[in-house]
Image: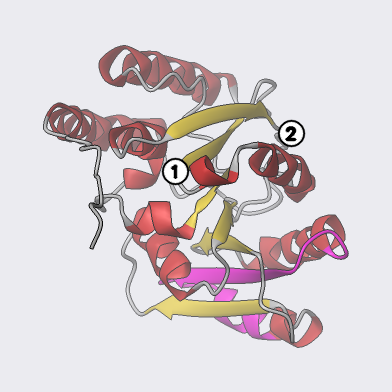
Amino acid sequence: MNAVPELAVVVPVKNEADNIEPLVTEIYAALDGVVEFEIIYVDDGSTDSTPSKLVETRAKFPRLRFLRHKTSCGQSQAIATAVKHAQAPLIAMLDGDGQNDPADIPNMLTRWKSEPEATREKLLIAGWRANRKDTSSRRWASKAANAIRAWALKDNTPDTGCGSKMFSRALFLDLPRFDHMHRYLPALTIRAGGKVESVVVNHRPRGAGASNYSNFRRALVGVPDLLGVMWLMRRSRNPAVEIPPQ
């Protein structure tokens, strides 16, 4: 890859071997000729054939780079590792299970570029799965969680759990990081003085494999996380900085 990439597509994965090559193929189809891009996978301590499948896929798709956590550190840390190693200043995030559609990225990029350049650095484009392809129990749990978060955090985002997101690398690196922080990116962006825009995205059934999360596990960690983010929101300050003549 000769040109410096404008966009990095980051994909955290754990035990997603069968979904890697199909998703990378779709990312190429969506972005090749549209924007200079790189793809960064982070394997979060997989115990299946994910590492070898990444090697195989990299041989076919040279824009793919990948890193590995020796032990599982969670999805948020995998995203942080990918963002820190990205060369591009703009990040598009996708889940590794194939449910997020890479074909939505060009539309998100157009929306990003329609914003005044001065405000893009603190802009988050959040995907909205208006027509989810999940089980009824997962849809119900997500709807309840979104309602509680919207009431508690006033993040004005209908679907904070959607994996399709776009943001500047600088914004992400300026946010507080903790386990499961990826579920609170809209609230954390607002806390940082930024702006959140939601766009409807396509949502698909899982490509292969099984989810690493259950509704019970999400709820178990969700309460302390929500309380922690509420505390962060209350303690935030965004000063207007003036630089006097030197």
Q: Is residue 75 above or below residue 55?
A: above
Which coloring applies here?
secondary structure
Image quadrant occupied by the C terminus: bottom left
The reply to whether the magenta stretch includes residue 50 is: yes
Segment colored magenta: 32-55
Q: Is residue 137 above or below residue 48?
A: above
Nearer the observer: mark 2 or 1; the answer is 1
Residue 83 visible to the viewer: yes
Q: Quadrant of residue 84?
A: bottom left
Marks 2 and 1, the one that precedes in the sequence: 1
Image x and y of residue 27, in percent: 76, 60
Work out whether residue 106 or residue 240 is closer to the camera in this orientation and state it: 240
Secondary structure under the numbered disc 1 in the rendered image: loop
Q: State the mark number for residue 122.
A: 1
Q: Is residue 63 above or below residue 140?
A: below
Query: Image check: 225 left or right of 163?
Result: left
> Which residue is drawn at the image coordinates 68% and 50% (left, top)?
98
Query: Image check: 114 left or right of 175?
Result: right
Judge the density around disc 2: few (<14), some (14-19), many (≥20) Cα neighbours within 10 Å: some
Query: Image check: 18 left or right of 215?
Result: right
Query: Image check: 125 left or right of 143?
Result: right
> Which residue is drawn at the image coordinates 70% and 21% (left, top)?
131
Amino acid type at image mark 2: Asn
Mark 2 vs mark 1, CA separation in Å: 24 Å
Work out whether residue 55 or residue 148 is closer to the camera in this orientation and state it: 148
Image x and y of residue 53, in percent: 66, 78
Image x and y of residue 20, in percent: 68, 66
The reply to whether the magenta stretch includes residue 220 is: no
Image x and y of residue 61, in percent: 77, 79
Judge the density around disc 1: few (<14), some (14-19), many (≥20) Cα neighbours within 10 Å: many
Q: State the mark number for residue 202.
A: 2
